[in-house]
Amino acid sequence: VDYPELAFELFESAMPTDMVTPSGEAKDGNVGNVTPPETEAPEAPVPSKTPANGDKVVIWAPGYNKALSVTKTGNYNVGVNVTASNGVLTGYGDTEVFTVTVNADGTYSFSNGGQNIGMAASYNSMNLGAVNDKWALTDLGSGLYLLKNTVRGTYMQWFAKYSNWSTYNSSSAATDPQYQLSFYIVEEGGNTPPATTKPVETTKPAETTKPV
């Protein structure tokens, strides 16, 4: 019982019907019958784990459903729309699949077409074949990672404001979905279900009457 209601009960006075109390319980006695609005449960993300040497992966930002592509618009890599459903990521192509190399120093490199994606000595953009091509991974849990260029010290990010992939040195990277990235492991042969061959229907020959 709220304090305003208690006061009316102590003095045996009628509480105004339009009076709103702190708990929202009005004079009509609908105590505890307020039904919270239904909320849709968030979709579970597709599986993500620390990649192993030789894995083929899609690097993507789950908070924006954008995958890193080697395709560029101007100086920056474009983002390809991807969809996560039933544990499978779809929407990407060959230009969004990178082969993982785990370097001897524990850093990671990601190649497409035989060239690692990295950074030049200046600017925040990324390029295939750039000299600074090693990335340190920080596991944030829940399948999310930070990718930090070991020489330039900037984090890979989906730059939502400009709708492209870039890098930046942010003190809040660990809590910013623009930097929270995932790896989708591409299985051998991709994720297309195997083709099935439809059996050829045969017509049974008509029965003939044996002569007597």
Image (cartoon, rainbow, N blue to C red):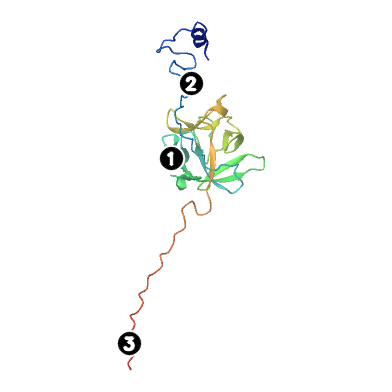
> Measured from the top left, where is residue 114 in percent x and y?
53, 48
Residue at numbered disc 3? 209
> Measured from the top left, where is residue 87 in percent x and y?
51, 45
User: Disc 3 and disc 2: Cα gap in Å?
Assistant: 86 Å
Residue at numbered disc 1? 80
Q: Disc 1 or 2, which lies upstream in sequence?
A: 2
Q: Secondary structure at mark 3?
A: loop
User: Disc 1 and disc 2: Cα gap in Å?
Assistant: 51 Å
Q: Residues within 10 Å of mark 2 (few under 14, many from 20)?
A: few
Q: Which quadrant, please, contains the C terminus?
A: bottom left
Label placed on residue 31:
2
Q: Nearer the viewer, mark 3 or mark 2?
A: 2
Residue, far front: 12
Amino acid residing under circle 1: Val
Q: Secondary structure at mark 1?
A: strand
> Measured from the top left, where is residue 53 in percent x and y?
61, 47
> Measured from the top left, where is residue 56 in percent x and y?
54, 47
Q: Nearer the viewer, mark 3 or mark 1?
A: 3
Amino acid residing under circle 3: Thr
One can see residue 62 in this view: yes
Q: Residues within 10 Å of mark 1 (few under 14, many from 20)?
A: some
Q: Secondary structure at mark 2?
A: loop
Q: Nearer the viewer, mark 1 or mark 2?
A: 2
**Quadrant in the picture for residue 153:** top right
Q: Residues within 10 Å of mark 3 (few under 14, many from 20)?
A: few
Q: Disc 3 or 1, which lies upstream in sequence?
A: 1
User: Disc 3 and disc 1: Cα gap in Å?
Assistant: 68 Å
